[in-house]
Amino acid sequence: MSHPEEPLDDGILHAYLDGALPADEAQRIEARISASSALQARLERARGQQREADALLALVELDAPLARPDSAVRPPRATPTWWQNLDPIALRWAAGFMLMVGGVWVLTPSPSREAMRALTEGPRMAMEERADSDVVRLGQDSSAVALASEPTADAAATARKAPPAAPASPPPPAARQLPRRIDLAEAATFLGGSVRTLPDAQFERADLLGDDPPLVQLTYRLPDGTVILLTEEPLASAGRADNAVAEARTRARANDATPRAERSAAQLRWSEGALQLELDGPVPAETLRRLREGVQK
Amino acid sequence: MTPHLAALFEQYHASLVRMLYRRTGDRDRAEDLAQETFARAVAAPPDNPRPWLFAVALNLVREDGRKAVRQQRRLQLLKAEMDVPVPGPDDDFDRAEAKARVQAALAQLNDRDREALLLKAEGFSYPEIAETLGLSLGAIGTTLSRARQRLVEAYHQHEQGGRDVAS
């Protein structure tokens, strides 16, 4: 870093004080400092600045301890659990034996197994249904949920346009009942501005839901963690004569390999489409309040 | 959260929030940014976690700042008004005043100096600071020297300003 004939700059003195220099370099610096009273004075000044800066920063401390999310952090185990002390070779033999027993059990028909499957299938399906509806219910008050359960004219129109589900495949996401249909003006009202021009709503991705007509789902993320999914029917209410062309363009925009920002900008011009809105993820209380107020208007 | 990430969280979360608090002056924002940083670590677990986490956190602060510079200025003005310490016991009063002066002094530093100083205060070594901020190793001593000098000078200027107003 420095040579005997070169002047020592303050950066080297601070690096020396911070113990950041290699040992041989530090020794050379030390020798030069001990031979020069001017360097000793500069070193003391640097030391004073270092200590004062550290003391000043120590004043800006968090006043209260941080709350620790219990689910996120678990302290590391101090001692190994009993199973960590088992002989790994014995464990391998045991695992092999269990696999063999399991294989025999699976290949042998048994009425008790059928009964067990019947017992486990029911709760699993119920859980799946509940998980699906939770997404819809987030951000909705009871009146909105009630609205969601009643088929509206718009929802019926959407249902008519939804493609028939293939027999062997799961239903497309577009077929799912969305909670409440809103238009752009409403979205703007209860989100405090146009969704598309909210400065802090970061566009994430666009997905096509279904093929005919293509519903375009745009995903925005607010800094507070709210995820806004806007599902559009860009052609349904636009009244365009050349729907087929426009539809093809929409599909291309959603799927092509152009950069995400460009794609987003292209889709943002589609402002005439009907909108459906649902919320997913953690929704802060303040955002929920605004949404509820908007939905109730 | 995997055990590895849980260990990272345990090890670095408090340090990261403290650094972000010193950087932003806003505890809630510091905690939000730290959460976002760890969320990104979950999505793409880093090889060298400490510099990675702090670099991401500082990038988030800068991105945030660029997006809402005008709004932030207003908030800072508002915050400066709100930060007037409430009269209370002398110790608390003096401490709150000194803390506000340090934050004001930190705000006067440029990004590089301030961030190097904050990382050093969190125990970062010179190579780690260089990696986190994308600087050369040889520049760290000079950066820290300048940052410390400016922080101390700015703090004393604010202290002097406070005395002038009081007299």
Image (spheres, helix red, strand yellow):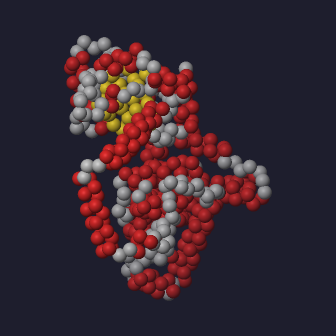
**Residue B148 appears in which quarter of the rendering?**
bottom right
**Residue A32 at what x, y percent from top left?**
46, 84
**Residue A163 at what x, y percent from top left?**
26, 24
Judging depth in this view, the residue of A170 and A172 nearest the camera is A170
At a point 69% along the width and 48% down the height, the residue shown is B84
Judging depth in this view, the residue of A146 and A216 nearest the camera is A146
**Residue A62 appears in which quarter of the rendering?**
bottom right
Quarter in which the C terminus of chain A is drawn: top right
At a point 36% along the width and 44% down the height, the residue shown is A115
Where B69 falls versus A197 (above or below)?
below
Q: Is residue A64 visible?
A: yes
In-image side of A281 versus A174 (left or right):
right
**Residue A59 appears in which quarter of the rendering?**
bottom right
Where B5 falls versus A268 (above or below)?
below
At a point 40% along the width and 64% down the height, the residue shown is B130
In-image side of A214 versus B161 (left or right):
left
At a point 36% along the width and 59% down the height, the residue shown is B46
The number of callouts visible is: 0
In-image side of A253 versus A283 (left or right):
left
Where B105 falls versus A232 (above or below)?
below
Q: Is residue B113 visible?
A: no
**Residue B1 at what x, y percent from top left?**
43, 55
Judging depth in this view, the residue of A44 and A194 nearest the camera is A194
**Residue A89 at what x, y percent from top left?**
30, 74
In-image side of B141 versus A96 (left or right):
right
Quarter in which the N terminus of chain A is drawn: bottom left
